[in-house]
Amino acid sequence: MRVIGGSLRGRKLASVHGMAIRPTADRVREALFNILGSLPQDARVLDLFAGTGALGIEALSRGARQAWFLDNAQTALQLLRKNVELCRLASQSHVMQWNIVKNLNVLHAGPPEFDLVFMDPPYDRAMVAPGLANLVDSRILAPDCVIIVEHAPSEPIDPPPAPLVLTDHRRYGQTELSFFSFRG
């Protein structure tokens, strides 16, 4: 696994073997960032269910201002911290352990509103809908924030919680990307 573009292009990221952490495939990440274009520039990014941190790190490599990485698994957090250090992004990164499906209260005190959110929960565990609901309820999204959810085809998002609007949907094998705009 590597960073696809930007200032860190080609940098290898640490990962683990097995299915405990399922990082976004390079080709899916490349397609995702091609769709986003210049959106990551100067953005404040939230990477939920961050795992290896590949999505948030990719955004930082492409000019994002800061990234907050949240995951609940200790293994993922250790791997994430390692990748942030490997890429020398500690000054732009905030790594936190939190149960995203429960709520996002950990974010109320500190960060500003987010411009770009990545959400990549474990597949087929019914975490997409509560994760999106908590994201909307948290009041941490900037107007016109873009939210990208990576999910399994067997877990459709219909309908999204208001005021999210589905703007695009793509399928790459067994991975689906749903793009939402926050009309807050």
Image: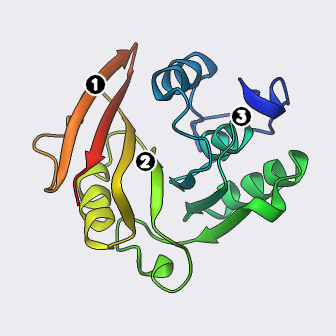
Q: Is residue 20 visible?
A: yes
Read off the residue under disc 2: 121
Read off the residue under disc 3: 17
* Mark before the other along the chain sequence, 2 or 3: 3
| Residue 92, numbered circle | none
Which residue lies at the image location 82% right of the left edge and 61% below the top edge? 90
The amino acid type of the residue labelled 3 equals His
Dot 3: within a 10 Å radius of its alpha carbon, few (fewer than 14), some, or many (20 or more) residues? Answer: few
Give the CA distance from mark 2 to mark 1: 17 Å
Secondary element type, mark 3: loop
Give the CA distance from mark 3 to mark 1: 29 Å
Q: Quadrant of residue 175?
A: top left
**Image coloring type:** rainbow
Relative vertical location of residue 95 with respect to residue 111 in this rendering, above or below? above
Which of the two marks, 3 or 1, is nearer to us in this view?
Answer: 1
Give the CA distance from mark 2 to mark 3: 18 Å
* Mark before the other along the chain sequence, 3 or 1: 3
Query: Which percent across, then down, holds residue 1?
Result: 74, 27
Which of the two marks, 2 or 3, is nearer to us in this view?
Answer: 2
Residue nearer the viewer, 157 or 167 = 167
Relative vertical location of residue 50 with respect to residue 19 in this rendering, above or below? below
The amino acid type of the residue labelled 2 equals Pro
Farthest-out residue, bottom: 109
Left or right: residue 126 compared with residue 110: left
Left or right: residue 101 compared with residue 49: left
Secondary element type, mark 2: loop
Secondary element type, mark 1: strand
Q: Is residue 3 visible?
A: no
Query: Which percent across, then down, holds residue 8?
Result: 82, 33
The amino acid type of the residue labelled 1 equals His
Read off the residue under disc 1: 169
